[in-house]
Image (cartoon, helix red, strand yellow):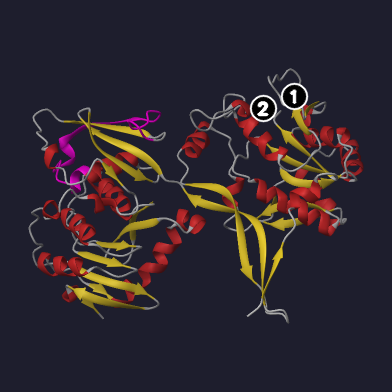
Amino acid sequence: MPTCVSLAADPGEMANDQTATALLVGGKSSRMGEDKSLLVCTAGEEPLYKKQLDKLQQLSKLPVLLSVRSGQKFEDLPHDVELVTDRLAEHGPLGALTSCLEHNRADWLLVLAVDLPQISPAYLRSLIAEAHHSGQGVVPRINGHWEPLAAIYPHSLLEKIQSHLASGQLSLQKLIQEAVNEGILIGRDVSSQEKPLFSNLNTQDDLAALKHEEVLPYDVQHWKEQAESKGGTCFSNTIKPDLVAVEEPVELRVEGRSIAVLMRTPGHDRELAAGFLFSESVIRHADDLFEISECPNRPPEGGPQGSVLDVLLKKGICAELDKLSRHVFTSSSCGVCGKSSIDSVFQSFAPLPEDAMKVSVADLLSLPARLSKHQKSFRRTGGLHASALFTPKGNLQVIREDVGRHNALDKTIGNALLKQSLPLSNTILLLSGRISFELMQKALAAGIPFVAGLSAPSSLAIKFARESGQTLVGFLRDKSFNVYAGKTRLCE
């Protein structure tokens, strides 16, 4: 069948002669405790204001306006950046916007605040394209609240702002609503996937969260099949922002000795270390641990930038590290696929005794929806595995996400270990992906009697579950499931 391809014009090229850009960096932040524009989000990277300038320089041939407060200094600015001193600094963002519009000579002004580091060039391009198409400025909106510091404004808004200020009104939110009512601006509702782009840096906690962000924005080429025409099937091609799961290395050491490099999603690293060491039989109790220290800026030898976790054991604890079952490097996608030999997989864990645990079919069928509700990072990226613990009645106890299936479960078990709540008897483990033998083994090590997954179990997982006394449920989705072992724990 003939195929026609519709290539969308690059909105950035459309904007070159019509749209100026402005970076707002002059706002003070008492909560952050330092100038946000000079923050460095990741070791070795440029300050935040330079990263934001790089985005805006991709969008227009016109110089970038850099809105600064009086006395604020920036060195080594590119030649295509013009400083604009905010003469109305006491009015906050409204004053900065006014100063930039006064300085601007183009038809449009795209503004971006320095403390919105997740906003991508593709998202900004889409604002420009929408403004040029509609002939109106575009301001994003989240749950009825305007996001005016990543928006595009027509030069004609300046007169409205000046009148607003002359009447003593200082609310930027009110100004935008009035301009929307008058047809000068239009609102653009932010989708649930786009909301993380508007994560604001206000405190040191925000900065720490950004440094351990589970997702990063990327600009991607998006192809979509359109309705068939006389010429055949048509496709559209656009550039759009996408959120991608972060994958970074962490080197795990015990008493200073490197035992593994794990590719994982940053976050809950202490739990990952504790769960890994426990499920690999390096330790047996939380009391075996003396300290887990993090060294965030030391890369594994010969590897990319990453973190180092150094675990110190209690005096008198002798760990047989030579028998550790993983190779020194472990992929996040398959966790323990790098076993040094198949024989090392079969560690000795006693089968579970019979118990009185009962799970109703209705409660079990409710778990996928409850898991999905709490998979925040998966909803943003579609690229993370989840491991969650539920009570027999379906109440969520803990959930952990990671790019690696095994890492997610190690974090879940590590959480329980550090809380001194092992064994996890009378508990349901729900896994978002396929169920392997190694995951069943880890569950048994933690005393988990009931394992369910949204996908298929392996033949070895089924064999293991039947020998270990565990209940194993697979394909728990679309209001149905299969029971492969331990059916006595299910009831109607």
Percent across and percent down for residue 30 are 61, 27
Q: Secondary structure at mark 2?
A: loop
| Crowdedness near tag 1: few (<14), some (14–19) or many (≥20) residues, C-alpha within 10 Å | many
- Is residue 139 at all visible to an observer of this figure? no
Q: Is residue 297 magenta?
A: yes
| Crowdedness near tag 2: few (<14), some (14–19) or many (≥20) residues, C-alpha within 10 Å | some
Give whichever of 199, 62 is nearer the camera: 62
Q: Is residue 57 magenta?
A: no
* Rendered residue at 91%/36% (across/down): 166
Residue 478 appears left or right of 132 = left
Q: CA distance from mark 2 to mark 1?
A: 9 Å
Label placed on residue 1: none
Residue 171: quadrant of the picture: top right
Q: Which residue is mark 1?
A: 69
Residue 107 appears left or right of 314 = right
Percent across and percent down for residue 269 are 33, 40
Q: Which residues are magenta?
A: 277-303
Residue 93: quadrant of the picture: top right
Q: Which residue is mark 2?
A: 28
* Rendered residue at 42%/68% (across/down): 369
- Is residue 210 at all visible to an observer of this figure? yes
Please state which amino acid type lies under the numbered disc 1: Arg
Residue 53: quadrant of the picture: top right
Percent across and percent down for residue 403 are 39, 52
